[in-house]
Image (cartoon, rainbow, N blue to C red):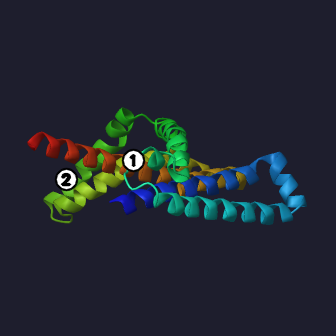
Amino acid sequence: EAATSYWLRYWVVFALVQAVGIFGTMVPVFGSFVAQHPYVLYICSELKLLFFIWLFSMENLLGAAASDEKALMAQTMPLTLFHDHITPILLEFEARVADMVSKATWMSLVHSKVERLFDVFVMVKLLSEERKDWLLHVIEESRTLLVPSISLLMPSFITKFGVAYVQFVVPSAKSTRALVATKRRKFAGNNSTEERE
């Protein structure tokens, strides 16, 4: 479970660093500078490589010293610090984009109608109940992707923002929520074990 938590944090930080790099090249002033001086991209790539080597090696070097997860050393690991400071911003950004279409509106205009259609499919045995539940979950989650999908109809400059959002921000937010849920289950399991003793 510690390995899963580590890699979830790592991939969230990795995706966000990649997103910052991509969004940075889309900013008109910096993007035109990079277009005129392509060696800047090579330097940025080398800096990203050094950053991730440092991040990975410091976690492994300092990890041997921090045997307890709750120790001060474990809380000050570079990956943990980056993750803990970046994820609140990430989750707020993702929530703002997702809430451009409110959950209540989405449920009443889209989800409820699709659910009725799927009920008919289940009734005529074109769809199983499990598959219906899974598809409804996908429909519910697709609310997050509605605004970025609109960028597909825009000029390529704007489409790149939508693609980068879907490619990096959405998976990072989902991974962060999975990590938080894992920590809550672990915490709840520890509390119930202590109460039994």
**Count the marks: how many?**
2
Q: Is residue 5 visible?
A: yes
Percent of width and height locating residue 112:
28, 42
- Which secondary structure, mark 1? helix
Residue 2 falls left or right of residue 81 = left
- What residue is disc 2 on? 119
Percent of width and height locating residue 127:
21, 64
Which of the two marks, 1 or 2, is nearer to us in this view? 1
Determine whether 146 is above or below 35 in the image: above
Q: Is residue 152 visible?
A: no
Determine whether 81 is above or below 104 in the image: below
Residue 183 falls left or right of residue 56 = left
Percent of width and height locating residue 122:
17, 59
**Do tag 1 and tag 2 residues touch (Cβ < 8 Å)?**
no
- Which secondary structure, mark 2? helix
Alpha-carbon span between mark 1 and mark 2: 30 Å
* Residue at image point 63% right, 57% down: 18
* Residue at image point 23% right, 48% down: 116
* Residue at image point 55% right, 43% down: 86
- What residue is disc 1 on? 177
Q: Which mark sits nearer the N-terminus, 1 or 2?
A: 2
Work out whether residue 166 or residue 57 is closer to the camera in this orientation and state it: 57
* Residue at image point 53% right, 53% down: 79
How many residues crowd mark 2 within 10 Å: few (<14), some (14–19), many (20+)?
Answer: some
**Circle number at residue 186:** none
Residue 147 falls left or right of residue 113 = right
Q: State the quadrant of the N terminus.
A: bottom left
Q: Amino acid at mark 1?
A: Arg
How many residues crowd mark 1 within 10 Å: few (<14), some (14–19), many (20+)?
Answer: some
Percent of width and height locating residue 3:
39, 62
Q: Amino acid at mark 2?
A: Asp
